[in-house]
C-alpha cells in the first residue's frame, strides 16, 4: 500500500482537561468486537502512565508489543512510535495539548515525549531530563510546516536539560538541512513517498546529525531521527496516527 504523505489528517482527543476524560472513556467503552479489547487495553495502560506521572502508584507495564496497522487504525487517538537503535518500537498516546500546538504523549512505562509539529521539545524518563526547546518558527520547518523546497539553509535550535545535580543547562546548535533525495519508507505497514533530509547541527560542545523523511509538498515529517540528549543519543520517531487539533 502506497500513499502520499499528508499532515492534514489525524485523530486526537480533545484539548485540555478533556484529554484525560477521553483517556478514561477510551479505557472503559467502545464498539463491540475484538478491536474494543485492544482499545481498552491501550487506554488503560495510558491511564497507568498518567497516574505515574503525577505521583500515583501503578504496576509496571509489560514491554510494548508491536501493533499491526489494523490495530492502530482502531485506536481513537493520536499515536507515535519511538525507538533507539534496533530496539522495539514503544508507543506513545497523545494525552495533553496546548493551543500553541505542543502535544505531550505518554507510554505505558511512564515515559513522555512532548512535540510541536515535527520538533521534539522535551521528554521524561528517557535517560536525559530534557525540559525544553526553542527555535524561531520563521526558520524552523519542524514547528511551522512548509514544503521542503521552502526549508531554510540554516536553523538555530536551543535545547534545555537538567543535569544530575538538578541544575538547568542549555545547548545551542546551528543546524543546516540538506536534501538527500526522494525515497519510500514503511510506517506500520503503510508506504509513503517522501524526501530524505539530513541535518548537521553544530555547537561548541558537539556535532549531531538529524534525519527527516518528509512529504515533499507539505513538509509533514512522517519519520525522523532526532538527537534527544547527551546520555540517550538519538530517537527515531514515527507518526502512526497524526495529531489533529
Image (spheres, rainbow, N blue to C red):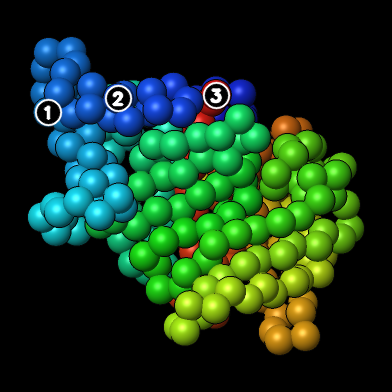
Residue occupying image coordinates x 28% and y 29%: 23
- As drawn, 182 above or below 24: below
Where residue 186 sits: x, y (%)? 47, 45
The mark that comes first in sequence, 1 or 3, is: 1
User: Is there CB contact under 8 Å for labels 2 and 1?
Assistant: no
Report the side of 63 relative to 115 (left or right): left
Foreground pick, 97 / 140: 97
Q: Locate the N terminus and report the quarter of the image it occupies.
A: top left
Where residue 131 sits: x, y (%)? 54, 62
Answer few, some or many: residues within 10 Å of disc 3's Cα (few below 14, many 20 plus, some between 14 and 19): some
| Residue position for label 1 | 37
Residues at marks 3 and 2, CA–CA distance in whole angstroms? 16 Å
Report the side of 138 relative to 236 (left or right): right
Count of numbered marks: 3
Answer few, some or many: residues within 10 Å of disc 2's Cα (few below 14, many 20 plus, some between 14 and 19): some
The mark that comes first in sequence, 3 or 2, is: 2
- As drawn, 128 above or below 80: below
Residue occupying image coordinates x 25% and y 54%: 55
Where residue 233 sits: x, y (%)? 51, 75
User: Is there CB contact under 8 Å for labels 3 and 2?
Assistant: no
| Residue position for label 3 | 245
Task: Judge whether residue 204 can be spotted in this image.
Answer: yes
* Nearest to viewer (mark 3 / mark 2): 2
What SS does tag 2 mark? helix
Amino acid at each position: 500500500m502506497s500513499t502520499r504523505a499528508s499532515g492534514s489528517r489525524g485523530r486526537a482527543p480533545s484539548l485540555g482537561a478533556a484529554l484525560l476524560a477521553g483517556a478514561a472513556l477510551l479505557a472503559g467503552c467502545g464498539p463491540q468486537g475484538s478491536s474494543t479489547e485492544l482499545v481498552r487495553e491501550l487506554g488503560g495502560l495510558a491511564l497507568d502512565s498518567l497516574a505515574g506521572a503525577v505521583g500515583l502508584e501503578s504496576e509496571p507495564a509489560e514491554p510494548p508489543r508491536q501493533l499491526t496497522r489494523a490495530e492502530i487504525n482502531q485506536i481513537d487517538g493520536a499515536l507515535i512510535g519511538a525507538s533507539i537503535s534496533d530496539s522495539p518500537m514503544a508507543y506513545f498516546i497523545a494525552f495533553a495539548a496546548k493551543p500553541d500546538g505542543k502535544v505531550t504523549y505518554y507510554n505505558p512505562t511512564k515515559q513522555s515525549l512532548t512535540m510541536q509539529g515535527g520538533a521534539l521539545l522535551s521528554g521524561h524518563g528517557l535517560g536525559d531530563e530534557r525540559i525544553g526547546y526553542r527555535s524561531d518558527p520563521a526558520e524552523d520547518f519542524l514547528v511551522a510546516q512548509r514544503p521542503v523546497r521552502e526549508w531554510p539553509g540554516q536553523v538555530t535550535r536551543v535545547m534545555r536539560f537538567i543535569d544530575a545535580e538538578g541544575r538547568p543547562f542549555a545547548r545551542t546548535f546551528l543546524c543546516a538541512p540538506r536534501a538527500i533525495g526522494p525515497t519510500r519508507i514503511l510506517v506500520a505497514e503503510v508506504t509513503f513517498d517522501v524526501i530524505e533530509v539530513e541535518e548537521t547541527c553544530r555547537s561548541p560542545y558537539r556535532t549531531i546529525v538529524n534525519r527527516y523523511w518528509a512529504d515533499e509538498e507539505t513538509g509533514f515529517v512522517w519519520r525522523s531521527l532526532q538527537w534527544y540528549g547527551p546520555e540517550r543519543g538519538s530517537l527515531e520517531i514515527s507518526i502512526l496516527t497524526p495529531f489533529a487539533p
